[in-house]
């Protein structure tokens, strides 16, 4: 019995390794060009069916609340969070958020069948229904926001730097970073990503992108540090996970929706 034990252990170990290999994610060819890494992440996003996103904000945002081109007001948004499950095919999304900007506002948003249902701690317990795209932050444009990062990083003249590999959840990730000037950002860079009224005049942005090394090179996260001329900074961290896992988004029951006036 003692002699058979090593053989048995080797057999069990072999089975475990084979099971791990069959059940794991296929390793991809090693990418050394930072532009190729970003392009792979953009392509995998375009082909994806679903994703889960988590976001946090820390620091001060210069927000133009009037929208008339005047000077923006600095607002501390530290501790703001958001999370969303997104069906990229339908499209549909279910998001929760807690925004800290002087006052704390929490809420929930559902995008399904061309309608956005929104409720917040300021508006009460009932959802307010609006056509998709009519709100300042459009959930249907979240995938476009990811592609906007890729567009910014692959613009002519932008220098990309490939950093050290890092662990990202259960995966290993490439890191690619870039420093963008106000001219490279453009005054509508964040607006095109979702209608955020953030004044980018004179700003600079450091972007660090994490991309999974295994195929199909999914985006794992983005850290953006926005520095303003007055010395204030805004740090946004976006984490992407659960790519292509099933997402079910349904409209709230009619009794939870405010009647149309």
Image (tube, rainbow, N blue to C red):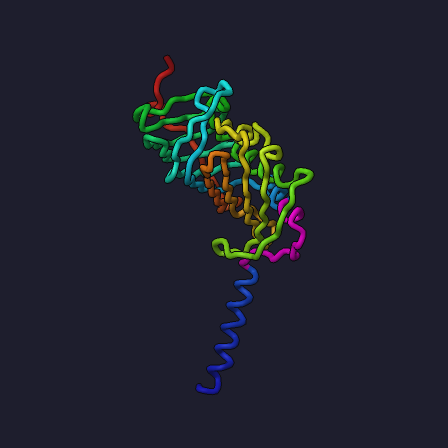
Which of 23 and 181 lies nearest the eye of the viewer?
Answer: 181
Q: Number of marks in the image?
A: 0
Which of 143 and 67 lies nearest the eye of the viewer?
Answer: 67
The region drawn magenta spans 23-38
Which residue is located at x 59 percent, y 30 percent?
A: 186
Residue 125 coordinates in the image, percent (x, y): 30, 26
Horizontal side of residue 113 vs 216, given as left or right: left
Quadrant housing the N terminus: bottom left
Q: Is residue 7 above or below residue 170?
A: below
Which residue is located at x 60 percent, y 56 percent?
A: 26
- In this view, which residue lies farthest toward the front? 230
Which of 204 and 14 lies nearest the eye of the viewer?
Answer: 204
Residue 257 coordinates in the image, percent (x, y): 35, 23
Which residue is located at x 62 percent, y 45 percent?
A: 38
- Assess whether residue 29 is covered by the magenta stretch: yes
Horizontal side of residue 100 vs 194, given as left or right: left
- In this view, which residue lies farthest toward the right? 156
Horizontal side of residue 10 vs 33, given as left or right: left
Residue 142 coordinates in the image, percent (x, y): 52, 34
Which of 17 and 238 lies nearest the eye of the viewer?
Answer: 238
Q: Identify the image quadrant of residue 150.
A: top right
Which residue is located at x 51 percent, y 20 percent?
A: 69
- Assess whether residue 200 is covered by the magenta stretch: no
Residue 231 coordinates in the image, percent (x, y): 46, 37
Predominant secondary structure, magenta span: loop
Quadrant housing the C terminus: top left
């Amino acid at each position: 019995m003692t002699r058979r034990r090593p053989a048995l252990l080797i057999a069990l170990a072999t089975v475990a390794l084979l099971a791990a290999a069959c059940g794991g994610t296929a390793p991809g060819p090693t990418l050394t060009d930072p532009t190729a890494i970003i392009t792979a992440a953009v392509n995998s996003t375009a082909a994806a069916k679903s994703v889960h996103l988590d976001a946090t904000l820390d620091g001060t945002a210069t927000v133009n609340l009037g929208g008339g081109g005047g000077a923006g007001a600095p607002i501390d948004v530290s501790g703001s969070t958001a999370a969303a499950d997104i069906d990229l095919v339908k499209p549909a999304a279910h998001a929760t958020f807690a925004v800290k900007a002087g006052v704390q506002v929490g809420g929930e948003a559902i995008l399904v069948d061309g309608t956005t249902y929104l409720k917040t701690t300021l508006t009460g317990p009932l959802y307010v229904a609006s056509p998709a795209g009519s709100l300042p932050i459009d959930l249907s444009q979240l995938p476009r926001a990811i592609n906007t990062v890729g567009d910014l990083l692959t613009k002519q003249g932008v220098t990309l730097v490939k950093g050290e590999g890092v662990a990202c959840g259960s995966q290993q990730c490439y890191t690619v970073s870039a420093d963008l000037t106000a001219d490279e950002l453009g005054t509508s860079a964040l607006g095109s990503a979702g209608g955020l009224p953030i004044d980018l005049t004179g700003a600079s942005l450091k972007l660090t992108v994490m991309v999974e090394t295994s195929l199909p090179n999914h985006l794992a996260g983005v850290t953006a540090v926005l520095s303003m001329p007055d010395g204030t900074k805004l740090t946004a961290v976006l984490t992407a996970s659960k790519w292509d896992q099933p997402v079910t988004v349904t409209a709230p029951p009619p009794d939870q929706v405010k009647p149309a006036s």
